[in-house]
Every structure is written in C-alpha cells, then in structure tokens.
Image: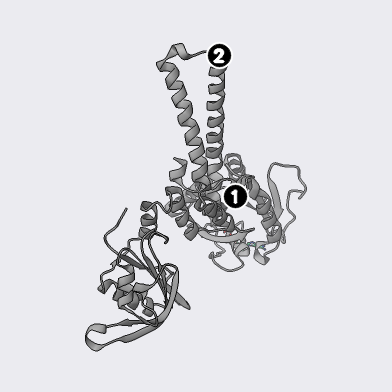
Amino acid sequence: MATSDTIVAIATASGDAAIAVTRLSGPDAVAIAARHFRGARDPVASGSHRILFGSFVVGAAVSGDIRLDTVLLSVFRAPHSYTGEDVVEISSHGGPAIPRSILEALTRSGARAARPGEFTERAYRNGKLDLAQAEAVAAIVRARSDRSLRAAHATLGGDLSRRIEVLDAELVTILAEVESRIDFPAEVREAAEVAALAARSAAAATVLREWISRLPSARRREEGVRVAIVGAPNVGKSSLLNALLGYDRAIVNEAPGTTRDTIEASIWIDGTEIRLTDTAGLHAATDPVERLGVERSERAAAAADLSIVVRDCTRPDAGAAESERFQATASGPVIVAWNKRDLAPSPVAPAAASEVTEVETVALRAGGVDALVAAIRAALPRVLGEYAAAELPATSLRQEA
Ligand code: GDP
C-alpha cells in the first residue's frame, strides 16, 4: 500500500547517549533529508543501502547554512527497507539537543511526526511483516529477559506465523472434507475414511490445546516471574526484600504493620526477571488503611507465580494459620523462609520431606540469601514450563485469543 506522507521520529531512546538515530520513511524521505544534508555525495542520486558522510544543516533559506552536526545518512530505497518505503536514517550525536533540532528541521521541511509504532505499522501494511512479527518487534523492544528476547526473535523470524499457517491449512482441509461429506452423503465410502478424518481433527486439536496450555509460561517469560513476599507483620519481609536486592529499596520499620503498601522491585536469575512484591502482612487487620494493604497483598499473592512465605523463628506460631491457609491456596510453588535464624533455631529440619521448600534466613545480614535464590532458581522450570523458549514463540494476548 502506498502512503502519501513521509513520517519522522527519533528512533533511539532519549537521554545522554553518544549517538542518536532519526528515521524518515515515505515517498519524500530522501528529498527531505537531502535538503538538510551537505556532503560529497547527493542523497537523491544515491542507490539503496548506502551510507553518506556529511553535515546536517538548518536555516538554509535566509541566513545560509548553519551546520548543526556531522552525520551519517543511511539510505534505503523502496521496497528494500524496514517499512517497504524509502527510508533514511540520520545518525547524529546523541543527547537531548541535537536529535530534537534535527527532528524539528525535518518536520519544518514537510515530514510528519510519526505516531508510536507507525514505522512498524507501515512495514505490516506493506507486507514486510505479518501481525505476529509486528507484535514481536514491540516484544523485542520491551523484552525484560534473555529468554523473552529469544522467544520474540523466533516470532519475528516468522516461526509462529508459519506454524499457524500449517495448522490453519490443515483445519481448512478437514472442514472442506467434512462439508463435502455432508453435502454428498453418498460419497461417504468407508468408516475408515471417517475415522481418519476424526483422527486428523483430534491431532489438530491436540496441537492447539498444547499451544494454549503453554501460553501462560510464555507470558511469564516476557513479563517476568511475579514473586509475592508474604507473611505476618514484622517477620522480616522488607528486610528480606532488601537482602535480595542488595540495597534499601523497601522501607524497613520496627513497628509492626508499617509496610502498608506493596513495593515492587526486580532481580534477574539466569536471564529471567524476578519481580518481587513485598506485601503488607497477611493477617486480620482492623485499621482501614492496614486493611487496604492486606487486601492488596492478598491480590498480589493470588496473582503471583511463586510465593515466599516469611516466618519468624522467634515466634514460630505467629502467622501460622495465615501461612498455612496461604500455602493451601497458592497456585504456584511456595518457598517458606524461616527468618531471624540468628535469634532462634528454626522449628523445621532443613531436610524435612515436604511439598514446600524451606530455607533459613537472617535477612538483616543477608544471611541465607544464596539458599533462597537457589530455591527460586529450582522452582523456575515449574513456573516457566519445561519448554525451550524457541519452541513457543507466542507472546501476546492477541495470539492467545
Ligand atoms: P516486615 O514487617 O515483615 O516487613 O518486617 P521488617 O523487615 O520490617 O523487619 C521487622 C523487624 O525485624 C526489624 O526491626 C528488622 O530489623 C528485624 N529483622 C528482620 N530480619 C531479621 C533477622 O534476620 N534477624 C534479626 N535479628 N532481626 C531481623
């Protein structure tokens, strides 16, 4: 599809950086860039996939050229570009000032500021990417872990789209055969033929069901594993979060029930983002603010992929009922951290045979953090699914639908 206007955007992140790339796409991309370029070679005469060295100039009309920066112009001719249109990428120095001046100069010369995702939208419209691939571009940009990056790359490569095409073709064939037998019942020859069709439908359904069953773990790979740190007030949840993070992100307070809101922070284990949520104590609260925090913590715990239930060695009975209730309702794996091990022995033998992994910690001195991280690592295959990332490139809710 031909688009009439030429769009422009700064393609790199804002902030201090050595270089920035400003990208133009559309029928006038080369002409607009050429208006601001002074170099040994003319962009308008340039072929595709050429890099030209020169200056970016502004204000040529009245005061003559004002040289803004030394730039490299990368020229891509339609249809051999990301969007399928003429594309020019201007590599300049980074920082906030120069890219913004370049952008302003190009918009004054007739380019329109692109909407978010508009380059990829054009690539999709021009048949350079299919919808799953376009989504994968967004997933790559947003990727929070090595695994999700690999999965997004597999989707971008067209893996998912190809597999869906194969399955789609199979389903259409099955449907056509079934319909022809309904329309012409006399054609139904043998029971074996019908059985073969039924087997093919069952096989297709199995493949579909398997994909769908793996989707939650694919989403976890992309978005990170949500870990809720729960337990009674004052057992050391905030201290444990700090110990895991290695810095004071959470506010630790001596008065029970002071961590009233949830606090989120991330660590990475084996390339997977572990999103830790420190919640207010799971207990029967009376104070309305406290009650709000507890409700939030219950929600966080219910939504978590993995839970760390913190217990206090000095008060083994504190929060026992809540902890047990929580362990019974948790959907994902549960790790019990017996904290304040420095003050009292833990009531559980470390080797206890149990469904639940138990570790001993001294959150205050970051003691036992290695064991806790090891327990989280050991639980990851269950949370993420045992599948290799590339096996399941599906990454979005649209694909799930
Ligand atoms: P939370 O309410 O569960 O988040 O508990 P905090 O992390 O705020 O800790 C409550 C109190 O217990 C604070 O005074 C901490 O210093 C203390 N504390 C936390 N972990 C330990 C530990 O392993 N050993 C000792 N001795 N004190 C701890």
Q: Which residue is mark 2?
A: 191
Q: Nearer the viewer, mark 2 or mark 1?
A: 2
**Residue 249 percent location from the top left of the image:** 54, 66
Residue 121 left/right relative to 354: left
Is residue 369 depicted above or below 10 in this figure?
Answer: above
| Residue located 65% across and 65% down the image | 364
Q: Nearer the viewer, residue 216 or 64?
A: 64
Query: Amino acid type of disc 2?
Result: Ala
Indicate left or right for 100 with 338 as reference: left
* Crowd class of label 1 (few under 14; some 14 to 19; many from 20; radius 10 Å): many
Image coloring type? one colour
Mark 1 falls on what kind of element?
Answer: helix
Residue 190 placement: quadrant: top right
- The residue drawn where x is 59% and y is 41% is 325
In primary-sequence order, the first of circles 2 and 1 is 2
Report the residue marked by disc 1: 389
Q: Is residue 196 left or right of residue 370?
A: left
Q: At label 1, which amino acid type do we have?
A: Ala
Q: Nearer the viewer, residue 349 or 140?
A: 140
**Where's ligand 1: which quadrant?**
bottom right
> Taking 152 as reference, is 186 above or below it?
above
